[in-house]
Image (tube, rainbow, N blue to C red):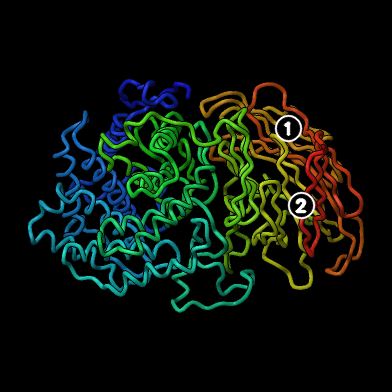
Amino acid sequence: MRDRPTAGLDLPPEDRAGAPVTGWTRRHWIAVADHLLASLRPYRSPLGARISPPGRGSWSGGDTDGLEGFARTAVLAAVRLAAGDEPARGRLGELADQVTAGLLAGTDPGGPESWPAVTDYSQQIVEAASLAVALHESRPWIWERLTPGQREQVAGWLGGTVGRGVRENNHVLFQAVVGEFLASVGAGHDRSEIEDRLDRIEPWYSGDGWYLDGPETRHDYRSGGPREFAVGPEAAYDAGRRFDHYNAWGFHLYPLLWARIAGERAGARAALYRERLHRFLAQYRWLFGPDGAVLHQGRSLSYRFACLAPFWLGALDGATPLTPGQTRRLASGVLRHFTERGAPDPRGLLPLGWYGEQSAAAQVYSSPGSPYAAAMGFLGLLLPAGHPVWTAPEEPLAGERADLTAALPVPGFLVHRTAADGLVRVLNHGSCYLTAPPAVERDEPHYARLAYSTRTGPVIGPEAPRIDNHLALLLPDGTATRRERIHRLAVTDRYAASWHRPLPPGGPVPGAAPPPVVSVSVPAGPWEIRVHGLRRPPGWGLREGGYALAAEAEPETVLRELPGAAVRTAPGANGPGLVSAVLGLHGWTAAEVHRRERANAFGHRCAVPLLVLPPAPARVCDESSERIEVVVGAVLLTGAPGAPPAPEVTVRVAGTEVRLTWPDGRELLVRPVLPWQAPVDRGPAT
């Protein structure tokens, strides 16, 4: 890893003997934790119950936002206390006193800084879980030093979560964690509620360690069939097959934190959670680049290195396929990657965004305190200095230095990694996000795209078009259709396929919706070959986008006519320069470049290469029509030095059959139509 400025961080010397890849040690982790905590002092309320960094507020209001800032940084403080008194800014006793003072001020009924009472479906339930984790992991420093009256006061506020309605997603785990902490200190709790909340995630477990973030369907015409929940509609966030980083910082994190509190009571549940975590980490590790970059997909991405929590829990609980040296190398690589790219920023804060501040990339439920969920990424400091994770030399991850294509069938991801540039791309044919009426025009760019990567992000914002890594049918007025519910057809190491019904703005129109689109992705070196089969209504155009490149400087256009379009960014603060390109291989007739400003988490200016087809001629278009249009394109994202190579694949199209041929004689025969037939994959010529 190259040395980069780290915005005011006072870091110890690197250890290239023990950490040959990153140079970072346990002392570096402590230094970053101390820096984050010290930088928040100016934003503490007078009594310490609220921490309110500057930035756009959430939908919950200022009082709850301040609670969120306190609760999430309390986790970081608790982990720092447990880590011990290595060189730090200020004594740990002062840190414990600050947390204690804020805790008592916030839970003081009627006090000037009392926190909002816990209500059904509220953000307070989420933050109560953070407080419970912080109090458990710092028992000798905070809880055990409280007087009986103070303990009763704190337990009284936390106890407000008992019996409350909770949202039907990862939120169910928060009640279980709070309830178990209350039980552990002899306070009022409901054992049946704890067990029920843990049971609720079982229908969402989908195999290979992956969980859905809540129900797949809800009472909505786009969800695959009507379904009513036993709880009220307030309890259901939007549905879909949502596979994302909430598996890391939600579904594997909180059950095992619950088990740490429950101790022997956790029993068989803890064993089950550890087995699932082991399976999850075996696949999740592929979503990280060797440079420490993290896949940019899904929601709540401002949590950043909270994605490291399951790796630390794997080491804590003996539930990981990684060696100690691999765990440390991956985790330190991620933390160093972010600290060298504006997280924390020059103020020492973690703003809403990815590297620097980009509030447009955050959801409306996120406040300036939300990014401090990143505290869960420091759970490795619960491991003592003598643990093998901190003493064993760093090791590269298995296969890190080779090209890789790996199928993750449960989430519907095909991982596509190239060793020359360390880029990880995920071809998405399974993870999707549904919204219910009246939000029928909402688009989820972090779920709906055909591909994501560790070095790029989708075009975002309220006025953002559906353009990058997206096949759009274009209405006569130029409006693009959406890819919402994704129906997985196949995910293998060689290709992935799915179909979706393109939705115009306002949702489907009975009798006028376009027929399904079948899409197939095939990795080919640094390229991805995309094959689509579709039927267009008369007067509708077609557009396919590649990866959006973003930087502070305007990305350069290097090609803007057939056979394709390409853009390039220069090396900069976020890493080596990149090239994004699209090539028309069959059916496409034009190419162009689309540009936006302040619409990407990776930089203020972004550009997207496009392939375009003009409106279709008048024709009869119905579900029974056999007039299927096939288009084939190649999509490139590369950071390798030198001119990008042309794709080494020959494409021949006959009717609806697409034959892809490689130089070694391997062939793949694809028919992008329904009913689906698996492609014929013929090995290399002998």
Location of residue 351 in the rendering, given as x and y in whole percent from the top left corner: 41, 40
Residue 478's label in the rendered image is 2
Up-down relation of residue 517 to residue 367 (above or below)? below
Query: Dot 2 lies on which element?
Result: loop
Residue 172 seen in render: yes
Residue 400's label in the rendered image is none
Q: Amino acid at mark 1?
A: Ala
Residue 368 seen in render: no
494 on left or right of 19: right
Residue occupying the point 15% across, 46% down: 141
Location of residue 31 in the rendering, given as x and y in whole percent from the top left corner: 29, 31
| In the foreground, 280 or 105 | 280
Label 1–label 2 contact, CB within 8 A: no
Judge depth for marks 1 and 2 and give the one in front.
1
Residue occupying the point 34% across, 26% down: 8
Residue situated furthest front in the rendering: 686
| In the foreground, 360 or 149 | 149
Give the quadrant of the C terminus: top right
Choose top left, top right, bottom left or bottom right for residue 225.
bottom right
The residue wearing badge 1 is 566
Up-down relation of residue 346 to residue 486 (above or below)? above
| In the foreground, 90 or 196 | 196
Up-down relation of residue 114 to residue 381 (above or below)? below
Residue occupying the point 64% across, 26% down: 640
Up-down relation of residue 449 to residue 676 (above or below)? above
Count of number-bearing discs: 2
Location of residue 391 in the rendering, given as x and y in whole percent from the top left corner: 32, 31
Q: Amino acid at mark 2?
A: Gly
Query: Dot 1 lies on which element?
Result: strand
Location of residue 354 in the rendering, given as x and y in whole percent from the top left corner: 48, 40
**Mark 2: few/some/many CA within 10 Å (<14, 14-19, 20+):** few
